[in-house]
Image (cartoon, rainbow, N blue to C red):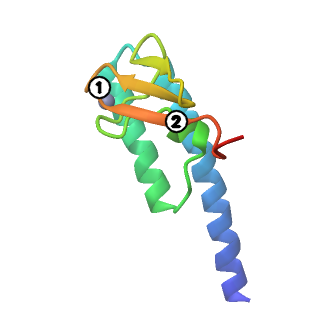
C-alpha cells in the first residue's frame, strides 16, 4: 500500500514539475530583454528537470543554449541557417555556441 502511495505522489510531483517547466520557459521568453533574468529562469528549469527526473520536451530542449542557458529566439538571441545537408544551424548571439537540429533522422530517403 505504502509503495503505491509513494508512486502516486512521485507521478503527481513530476506532472507539477513538468507544468512549471513549461510556464518558466514561457516566462523566460517573455522576459528576454532582461538577459540575466531569463538565464536565471532557464537555470531553474534545468534544476527542476534534474531534481524531479523530468525529461525536457524537445520543443524546449532545442530552444535553450547549452553553454550560457539563454533561450534561443530567432532574430533576438539566435541566428538560423538551414543547411543543404538537412539540419538547422542555430548560433547563439550571446556566446557563439552552435547547435544543430536535424530535420529528418532517417538518411537517404
Ligand atoms: Zn549561448
Circles 2 and 1, Cβ within 8 Å, touching? The answer is no
55 up-or-down from 23: above or below:
below
2 or 1: mark nearer the eye: 2
1 up-or-down from 18: above or below:
below
Residue lying at 57% horizontally and 43% vertically, measured from the top left? 20
Label 1 crowd bin: few (<14), some (14–19), many (20+), radius 10 Å: few
Which type of secondary structure does the marked residue at label 1 adopt? helix
* Residue lying furthest bottom: 1
Is 32 situated left or right of 52 in this image? left
Q: Nearer the viewer, residue 97 or 71?
A: 97
* Residue lying furthest left: 95
Considering only order in the chain, which callout, 1 or 2, is on the residue closer to the N terminus? 1
Q: Nearer the viewer, residue 4 or 101?
A: 101
Q: CA distance from mark 2 to mark 1?
A: 26 Å
Residue 8 placement (x, y as % from top left): 71, 71
Residue lying at 45% horizontally and 61% vertically, measured from the top left? 51
Give the mark count. Answer: 2
Which type of secondary structure does the marked residue at label 2 adopt? strand
56 up-or-down from 66: above or below:
below
Quadrant hosting residue 14:
bottom right
Q: Quadrant of the C terminus?
A: top right
Residue lying at 51% horizontally and 41% vertically, measured from the top left? 61
Q: Quadrant of the N terminus?
A: bottom right
Residue 71 placement (x, y as % from top left): 43, 28
Residue 103 placement (x, y as % from top left): 62, 34
Residue identified by numbered label 1: 36
Quadrant hosting residue 90:
top left
* Residue lying furthest front: 108
Residue lying at 56% horizontally and 55% vertically, measured from the top left? 55
Residue identified by numbered label 2: 101
Name the disc covering residue 2, or none.
Answer: none
Amino acid at each position: 500500500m505504502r509503495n503505491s502511495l509513494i508512486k502516486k505522489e512521485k507521478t503527481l510531483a513530476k506532472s507539477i514539475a513538468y507544468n512549471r517547466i513549461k510556464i518558466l520557459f514561457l516566462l523566460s521568453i517573455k522576459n528576454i530583454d532582461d538577459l540575466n533574468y531569463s538565464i536565471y529562469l532557464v537555470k531553474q528549469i534545468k534544476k527542476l528537470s534534474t531534481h524531479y527526473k523530468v525529461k525536457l520536451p524537445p520543443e524546449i530542449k532545442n530552444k535553450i543554449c547549452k553553454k550560457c542557458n539563454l533561450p534561443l529566439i530567432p532574430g533576438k538571441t539566435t541566428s538560423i541557417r538551414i543547411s543543404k545537408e538537412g539540419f538547422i544551424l542555430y548560433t547563439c548571439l550571446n556566446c557563439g555556441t552552435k547547435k544543430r537540429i536535424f530535420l529528418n533522422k532517417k538518411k537517404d530517403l
